[in-house]
Image: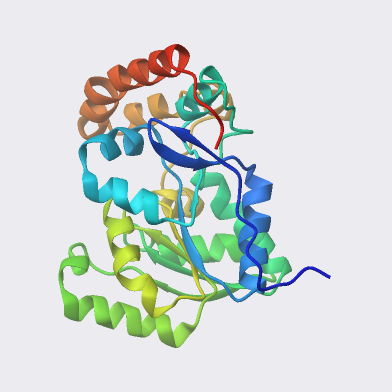
Amino acid sequence: MPDPTTQHPLDHITLRGIRLHAVTETGCVEHLIRELDAGRGGWVITPNLDHLRRAENDPEFRQMLDEADVVVADGTPLVWASRLQGTPLPERVAGSHLVWSLAQEAAKNGRSLYLLGGNTGAADKAAVELKKRYPDLVIAGTDCPEVGFDKNPDRINEVMKKMLDAGPDIVYVGLGSPKQERLIRQVRVKLPHVWWIGVGISLSFIAGDVRRAPRGLQKLGLEWLHRLMQEPGRLAKRYLVQGLPFAARLLLGAALHPSDRK
């Protein structure tokens, strides 16, 4: 029998110096459940194009990507670039899909889930929706602290006490990036056997407060266009001024400078 204490690292590639695990969504979920069964927790980051761009200009964010235990490509352009450089990722592993598939496996395996953050009321509504779809899922708790709580050590301690009392196996943190990564980095040592995942706006997706792009746009890598149409004032600079030029550089660089799989 395999030794349950032995870690089985995931294969990975490197894209613009960033390690990305070469795993399917199903493989990622199976890995997390297997690690939980072995008594190990960890940290998942699902970088998209904006995260990759930020990592080149923000040493702190780059370091957090390096520290995470599982890093899977949420952005379709990252998958395209991996293919162009000759180290193809098997598929996109979107955080907004992972929140469902991981909850499903957690329900099957008796693992509990904690929902932290999101817009007001989103965590509670998301918990209801997840329970509707997966009746056996254990929701250890929900919490939606006020904006700015992550800058107040006393409030962080209060949030952590509530979570410690709940004793979850998996925590979805929906604070947006990089706030959620900074918080996870700060507090995960207090719950080392828990898997932490920054889920961005996904709690609002689950709750039904924000509509996801049609599946056709998702497959074409145009989910960003749907988001832009919903929030043009907030997202125009990120997607049009920063995102498109970076995407062009990413794809061109991948095509011109193939890499070896590591």
Q: Is residue 15 above or below residue 39?
A: above
Coordinates of residue 39 in the picture (x, y in percent): 60, 76
Which residue occupies 49% across, 24% down? 259
Coordinates of residue 201 in the picture (x, y in percent): 39, 49
- Left or right of 133 on screen, residue 206: left
- Left or right of 64 on screen, residue 83: right
Coordinates of residue 91 in the picture (x, y in percent): 61, 33
Coordinates of residue 206 in the picture (x, y in percent): 50, 52
Which residue occupies 17% across, 63% down? 148
- Report the quarter where the C terminus lies: top right
- Report the quarter where the N terminus lies: bottom right
Q: Nearer the viewer, residue 174 or 54?
A: 54
Q: In the rendered image, which quarter is residue 111 located in?
A: bottom right
- Left or right of 36 on screen, residue 66: left
Which residue occupies 62% across, 43% down? 23
Q: Is residue 223 above or below residue 170?
A: above
